Image (tube, rainbow, N blue to C red):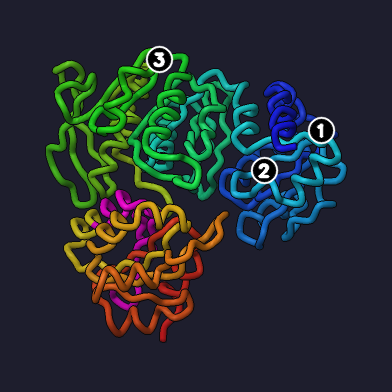
């Protein structure tokens, strides 16, 4: 039965999916509508004219927003909610045992993944810039949006995080779509970019990929789908190993001498960096980036190189990059607790955790207290030692229960055990018990960190005082 369903889903062409999404008399149902990407696709579908219904496990700002805009959102996965739908779109966070999917398939209602639906909606855009990588996708998408908007290109954007506007979706012209190309479950193999950017490549999503070799093969295939060119970070060892196997035109960047575009950090601003960019040894310009984290320089260079390859004037690019101030939940300063600065960050992979903690230490010249919620049991288990090493960079660490997302618990994998193995600087706490320990036993800058639902923890840190 599973094989039959897979064939039925593949037989629905992108043209047919796009036609369904644009039909005024059509109804599209989204399973897991509250996720960032699903929310954006639902919004885009409503703008195109189709009627939207959906489901999710709990109410959120996004489900409330969709309801106010006219969507019908159920806070349960009920089989009868798909009755009468013309198409069902599902997030990869739900499995084949989801009652809505089972019902839709039994009724012969077409079901497509989020990636398939997103790919179908993008076919009408003349240029499509997809940003892939284990880290930095949302930031680079926002930087590209800033550059092309500054160049009056009116880009449309599908981001995995809120843009400066406060929304992850931006509706522009049909000349350009900038989007995140996520590797999870090979989602980015559904897309047909004109330009594909690869920022970095690491072992992740171990609930799907067998190992690093499988992820490399997936990236190689995804980058080879770009019709104009791909932009690849040659400083990344794993990308460097596959760069010669990527089909089509490849443009490289990095700090090493073998890159087509070579950059060097030449100065430090109050909250950022000055860097130069050269092409084949000839300097192009000096840029100022006004956000923290040296890793963001690499993200900026990736966006700059893509824009240069598409003919955007370097002065326009320089102005856009210097005016860029970051996006939500990416080393975002959100307020204070008593006199302590509080930051909000999405880091959940060991590399990201290291980079964020080190960036905050450099930025604040202060001790750093990390409140961290591990994201998924599989990631925590497979990256256990790296996770311990990364979190040990914190001067004080409060670990909260693992955010399971789509997964069941794994025996022996817990935040309690992680805290015990890290040692004295680490403390396990239930979400609701953080503040007493935070105020009595820690000091310095506070960062609420993780990819799960951290909003209540953030609000408690900012507004609830013991």
- Front one among 2 and 363: 2
Q: Which residue is mark 1?
A: 24
The residue at the point 33 percent across, 76 percent down is 427
Image x and y of residue 40, in percent: 60, 42
What is the spatial separation of the Cα atoms under label 2 and label 3, in whole angstroms?
A: 31 Å
| The N terminus lies in quadrant | top right
Say if the magenta span includes residue 301. no
Q: Position of residue 439 (x, y in %)?
A: 32, 82
The answer to which quarter of the image holds residue 316 is: top left
- Looking at the rendered structure, the secondary structure element under dot 2 is strand
Indicate the secondary structure of the residue bearing disc 1: loop
Towards the viewer: 243 or 97: 97
For the residues labelled 1 and 3, the Cα–Cα distance comes to 40 Å
Residue 167 in the image: above or below residue 425: above
Sequence-wise, the earlier of marks 2 and 1 is 1
Report if residue 262 is visible in the image.
yes
Disc 2, disc 3: CB below 8 Å?
Answer: no
SS for callout 3: loop
Q: N-terminal of the two: label 1 or label 3?
A: 1
Residues in magenta, as a range: 330-357
- Quadrant in which the C terminus is drawn: bottom left
Q: Could you say which disc has been placed on residue 247 in the image?
A: 3
**Is-magenta flag for residue 348?**
yes
Residues 14 and 282: in front is: 14
| Nearest to viewer (mark 2 / mark 1) | 2
Q: Is residue 420 above or below residue 113?
A: below
Q: Quadrant of residue 324?
A: top left
């Amino acid at each position: 039965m599973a094989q039959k369903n897979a064939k039925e889903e593949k037989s629905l062409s992108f043209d047919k999916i796009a036609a369904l999404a644009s039909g005024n008399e059509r109804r599209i149902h989204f399973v897991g509508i509250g996720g960032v990407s699903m929310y954006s696709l639902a919004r885009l579908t409503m703008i195109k004219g189709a009627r939207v219904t959906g489901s999710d496990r709990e109410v959120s700002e996004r489900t409330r927003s969709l309801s106010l805009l006219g969507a019908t959102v159920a806070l349960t996965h009920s089989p009868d909610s798909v009755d009468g739908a013309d198409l069902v779109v599902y997030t990869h966070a739900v499995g084949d045992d989801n009652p809505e999917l089972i019902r839709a398939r039994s009724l012969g209602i077409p079901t497509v993944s989020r990636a398939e639906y997103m790919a179908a909606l993008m076919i009408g855009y003349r240029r499509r810039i997809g940003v892939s990588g284990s880290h930095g996708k949302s930031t680079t998408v926002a930087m590209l949006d800033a550059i092309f908007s500054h160049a009056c290109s009116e880009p449309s954007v599908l981001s995995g995080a809120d843009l400066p506007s406060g929304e992850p979706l931006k509706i522009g012209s049909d000349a350009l779509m900038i989007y995140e190309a996520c590797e999870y479950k090979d989602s980015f193999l559904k897309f047909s970019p004109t330009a594909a950017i690869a920022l970095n490549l690491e072992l992740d999503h171990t609930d799907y990929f067998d190992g690093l070799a499988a992820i490399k093969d997936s990236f190689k295939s995804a980058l080879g789908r770009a019709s104009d060119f791909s932009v690849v970070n040659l400083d990344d060892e794993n990308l460097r190993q596959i760069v010669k196997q990527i089909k089509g035109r490849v443009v490289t960047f990095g700090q090493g001498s073998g890159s087509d575009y070579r950059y060097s950090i030449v100065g430090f601003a109050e909250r950022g960096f000055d860097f130069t960019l050269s092409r084949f040894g000839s300097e192009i310009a000096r840029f100022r980036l006004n956000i923290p984290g040296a890793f963001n320089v690499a993200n900026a260079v990736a966006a700059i190189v893509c824009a240069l390859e598409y003919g955007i004037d370097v002065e326009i690019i320089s102005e856009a990059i210097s005016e860029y101030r970051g996006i939500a939940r990416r080393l975002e300063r959100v307020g204070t607790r008593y006199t302590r600065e509080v930051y909000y960050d999405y880091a959940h992979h060991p590399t990201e955790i290291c980079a964020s903690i080190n960036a905050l230490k450099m930025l604040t010249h202060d001790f750093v207290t990390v409140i961290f919620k591990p994201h998924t049991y599989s990631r925590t288990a497979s990256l256990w030692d790296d996770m311990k090493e990364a979190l040990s960079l914190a001067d004080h660490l409060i670990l909260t229960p693992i955010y399971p997302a789509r997964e069941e618990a794994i025996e022996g994998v817990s935040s309690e055990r992680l805290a015990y193995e890290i040692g004295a600087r680490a403390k396990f706490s239930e979400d609701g018990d953080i503040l007493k320990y935070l105020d009595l036993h820690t000091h310095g800058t506070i960062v609420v960190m993780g990819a799960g639902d951290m909003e209540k923890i953030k609000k408690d840190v900012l507004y609830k005082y013991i």
